[in-house]
Image (tube, rainbow, N blue to C red):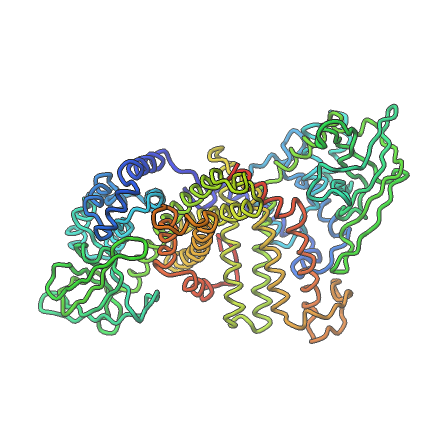
Amino acid sequence: MDLAFTPEEQAFREEIRAWVHSNLPKEISHKVHNALRLTRDDLQGWAKILGKKGWLGFGWPQQFGGPGWTAVQKHLFEEECALAGAPRIVPFGPVMVAPVIMAFGNAEQQKRFLPGIASGEVWWSQGYSEPGSGSDLASVKTRAERVGNKYIVNGQKTWTTLGQYGEWIFCLVRTSNEGKPQTGISFLLIDMKSPGVTVRPIKLLDGECEVNEVFFDNVEVPAENLIGEENKGWTYAKHLLSHERTNIADVNRAKRELERLKRIAKAEGLWDDQRLRDQIALLEVDVVALEMLVLRVLSAEKSGKNSLDIAGLLKIKGSEIQQRYAELMMLAAGPFALPFIEEAMEAGWQGDFPGGDASHAPLASTYFNMRKTTIYGGSNEVQRNIVAQTVLG
Amino acid sequence: MDFDFSDDQQQLRDAVRKWVDKGYSFERRRAIVAAGGFDRAAYGELAELGLTALTVPEQHDGMGQGAVDAMVVMEELGRGMVLEPLAHAFITSSVLSSYAPAAVQSAWLPRIASGEALVVLAHQERKARYRLDVCEAKATAAPTGYALTATKSIVPAGDQADAFLMPAQLDGKLALFLVERAASGVTTRGYVTQDGSRAAELQLSNAPATLLTQDGLGALELAVDTGIAATCAEAVGVMDQTVALTVDYMNQRKQFGVAIATFQALRHRVADMKMQLELARSMSYYASLKLGAPAPERRAATARAKVQLGQSMRFVGQQSVQLHGGIGVTDEYIGSHYFKKLTQLEMTFGDTLHHLGEVSKRMQETAGVFA
């Protein structure tokens, strides 16, 4: 047993750190470090920089043009990016749909879709949730009917994150009502410019339009856009979930944000306030414990021994920590977190923020926004069901 | 970065588990508690397994193994709620080999390794609670060595041990001494603690003592950090068993015509117990892996670990009782003994609030395992 990374892993970290330092635009990292609004261009700009280096698909195997990194190397890459203030990679293309295309798509589909994902040129969205299908995803109703060499799609997806920028969307669609709900689902790739696709942003409680409704009205989709076999989509989607591993915990971002919380506490003159400080100390213990849990999973993957089936725990704890730091940041600002001045969340705003410190502007919005983390990606209650299943049978 | 156990460590685990399963049944434990909470014969069996020698350096007849090996052993002893204070063999071998004069090491370490001598840390005082820098015990120079006048509380197996590591003020500074129980001026008053193990109050009146080091605080901190790591590992073993016992019970116990393991409100509680167990296990690893780090880093790590372990122990213990229902609060059932063990371990070497204060005090601007 050894806590230290190997010299090779350490050297790898240094290499990533140096590269990120010279390639991550400062105006983007400034926004990330201060929770200011990121534009589409910020997100895609960083994606393209990574894409050019061949690192947007940092989890991809070499045969598909990825770097073929180990689990530890992937973790170190994500950590260095997060600590440097890089935006999170928008996962829908490189992290979510690409592995499905690699595993279940045909050669034609791989050739057609993977290059645009790897370069960051094509913006992908995820079409899973529906108004009637949240935690119970297998109940999706959006229908795809095979007519000749195409599918006719009708229905509605929702909570489509950043779907307003989407060019392609991968969807779970119902192709059969026979048997169990899971067995009638197919995995379909849809061009969002197709006639009949409508995207309507949903304004959230923080004032942002981070998610959307996507409507399909007699949308024609070529049958060649079906991944794998008809009615096997659920299996493919589950494969995807099993490959979302340690990054579900988002521990690297938690470390960065805990450091930011400490800076805020200092700036507010609360560093020596024992009551707040103890709360930060508890969070510090939580973050170390979560990181140790993540490292255990990585170690198990590395050696192939003692496999740890604890993705549910990582999701629960990671999301709770994100909510907690956002909450403490807001509380640290006190009443000055209350003014809701949207322009003040833009980089470079020169206005006069109530109380005089515009860095307070995004704190409450972030707190409100973070309530999503225990709901999305399988709510924490669903995660508890999964964990309980592994423990109790 | 590697959290796999070596083959040797796995064999060590298997050997200790076998002894716990075959040699330290709940019935035997109950008999030991009834007889006062400490059994020298059982301690001798630990010595026969080589466990008292585990972390003693090889030149003093020990096995020279490290913190992870000690952790493995403590996890397994935790599973059986073993009463005999083996953690103190790890504490004393670590402190003596790091701080004591060569002659003291040669005199005591081989006897600790063989199990012939039980030496325990005796540092707690009424006014210090969990603090290490508060100490009223006083040492004065005597014609041969030193003389200690002190009152020490809740000393593990204090009326059975052969000698004590004891901090005392010497010329206004904390120093660490070794005192033999049989020495003149030492009186003990033994009793049983909440988990069934034995402890004692010690009274020393000008008792002869051997000076181990004038850096008493540094040595005491190492002693307590070693104790914290051992306690964390022991707690992981206890919690492993507690969760297993609870899961077993829930799958057998029927109410409303079905196993109570089918009720979602209870299943979520079990998921939360599993969370606390795995966070605790992670932080137990962290504490043991940081034992060899420079003192400030080591201190920060053990405080963080004890905060996590303390929270986990209380949650797992309390929920286990609740999920068992009435049977969970009976003395007859083993589950209540796990709960009491966890409660006592939380309050050993500093409770959660104490260590939260330590984490808070030591907090830096950085965050994470490697900060």
Q: Nearer the viewer, residue A41 or B238?
A: B238
Residue at the far front in the pictured view: B256
- Residue A1 screen position, x and y as percent: 41, 42
Q: Residue furthest left?
A: B143
Residue drawn at 65 percent across, 59 percent down: A33
Asked whether residue A17 appears in the rendered view, the answer is no
Where residue B36 appears, as percent x and y from the top left, is 22, 53
Is B183 rendered above or below residue B66?
below
- Seen at 61% across and 45% down, the residue is A248
The outermost residue toward the top is A148
Number of marks: 0
Who's the residue at 75% across and 65% down the image? A348
Q: Position of residue A159 (x, y in %)?
A: 75, 47
Does residue B100 lie above or below B45 as drawn? below
The residue closer to the viewer here, A79 or A155, is: A155
Q: Position of residue A52 (x, y in %)?
A: 71, 41
Tell me the residue at 58%/50% (across/down). A318
Q: Is residue A320 visible?
A: yes
Of A279 and A185, which appears nearest the observer? Answer: A185
Q: Is B241 on the left or on the right of A137, as rendered?
A: left
Between residue B276 and residue A42, name the one nearer to us.
Answer: B276
User: Residue A179 vs residue B189: left or right?
Assistant: right
Q: Is residue B147 left or right of residue A327?
A: left
